[in-house]
Image (cartoon, helix red, strand yellow):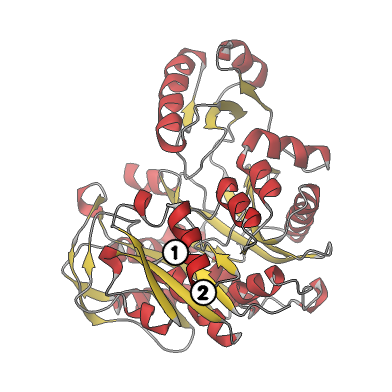
Amino acid sequence: MTFHKVLIANRGEIALRILEACRELSVDTVAVFSQVDEQMPYLNLAGERLCIGPANPAKSYLSIPAIISAAKLSGAEAIHPGYGFLAESPDFVEVCEDDGLVFIGPPSEVMALLGNKVAAREAVAAAGVPILPGEAIPKDGDAASAGERIGYPLLVKATYGGGGRGMRLVPDGDALEGAVLAARAEAKGTCGDGSLYLERAVESPRHIEVQILADAYGNIVHFGERECSVQRRHQKLIEESPASYLDKETRSALHASAIVAAHAVGYRNAGTVEFVLDSDDRFYFIEMNARIQVEHSVSEVVSGVNLVKEQIRIASGDKLRFTQDEIVLRGHALECRINAEDPMHGFLPSAGRVTIDELPNGFGIRVDTHLYNGMEVGPYYDSLLAKVISWGEDREEACIRMYTALERFRVRGIKTTRSFAQEIVSHPSFRHERITTDFLSNLAAD
């Protein structure tokens, strides 16, 4: 089966990536947009364009009725959600299924399972994937006794949602009650559900994830791992593939566990299995992201596979076009996220009209962006402006290319994290040491 028309339920650089993938597959497209995005140049690449509401995401990109109506009006057969917005909404997937629309992602029941972090932990643990000690907190239950059973330090985590919201590190029992109250309020405010669970915390962990693709016929492959340990407040800033300082046995075990986890939940389409590693490289499953991720680009660069195109093929009913042995990973790739934020003033969001003096290019450099001269960066959406990706025969070459590329990423009118990223990739600790999730906080303390 081949789709005739796909609706793209997103904006920015991921909307552009999906448009390009559909064009390469000779699939017609419908691009939806909010009123404030009407001038985005990528909309001109779509076969059709439909306004779905005002700038407020709740009334446009997060509006299920608006997007479903646009799909029906345009005659689209499938919807690609990209990442963010409705990409991990089981309700949205269920509505698509009920209305005869193909959701380019996993089925609603898989989405619902993975959206419940406690249920996902239990499912993969039953299949033999290692998890950290943890348990759910009943809404009227005793968190203190659960904390004692699990042991400190521990993390309070939101059962639903993500992005570090509703997460608190608790060093000892005295801090637990306040952390639970704060996390519950934050979780309730961001995803509408205050359910929490406790999980043993790994001190100075590494955050490593495995990219997978799964078709509807039980075939699952991985594209190696990504190191995502450079984070600020649980938000990734720099990603790379492969991870450094990882022995062959641990790397193979990570890949195998990711495949087992995907089978355990009946996964389909593109997804990411996330792990934390302790100082002895023992790894533990933390969650599975049921969507294409921002950092998928580094996996594409080292594998030579267009993951967005494969998503569309799988959703249309195709089998995977390759076996695991046919996926060859070559060289090293880095990705730096360039956000409209001011690092000199607490990473406050920056707004204004963009003037582009130069964007990097050349051998081993890729820039994924929706930026254009005169673009007005406002307060309505995520601060991500661009992703700069470098490739090299080895990590050192990729770092050198990245530094030069960032030097050539020159825009005016807003503050960005470009110089901050440049400082990181040139720092001796980043270049020569094992990176953990407290890397940036340790640098700030020096």
**Residue type (three-letter) at the residue carrying disc 1:** Asn
The mark found on residue 313 in the picture is: none
In the image, taking residue 49 as reference, residue 37 lies left or right, namely left
Whether residue 114 is visible, yes or no, is yes
Q: Nearer the viewer, residue 72 or 31?
A: 72
Above or below residue 197? Residue 83 is below
* Marks 2/1: CA–CA distance: 9 Å
Residue 444: x, y in percent? 33, 45
Task: Give the structural element (helix, strand or loop) at label 1.
Answer: loop
- Which sits earlier in the primary sequence, circle 2 or circle 1? 1
Q: Label 1: how many residues lie within 10 Å, few (<14), some (14-19) or many (20+)? A: many
For mark 2, what is the residue? 18
In the image, taking residue 268 as reference, residue 228 lies left or right, namely left
Q: Residue at x 63, y 16 (%)?
A: 146
Q: Quadrant of the image for the N terminus?
A: bottom right
Q: Nearer the viewer, residue 301 or 113?
A: 113
Residue 357: x, y in percent? 21, 81
Above or below residue 314? Residue 424 is above
For mark 1, what is the residue? 10
**Residue type (three-letter) at the residue carrying disc 2:** Ile
Q: Residue at x 59, y 26 (%)?
A: 198
Quick check: marks 2 and 1 in contact, CB under 8 Å? yes
Above or below residue 170? Residue 248 is below
Above or below residue 50? Residue 88 is above
Residue 276: x, y in percent? 62, 45
Query: Which residue is farthest front?
Result: 73
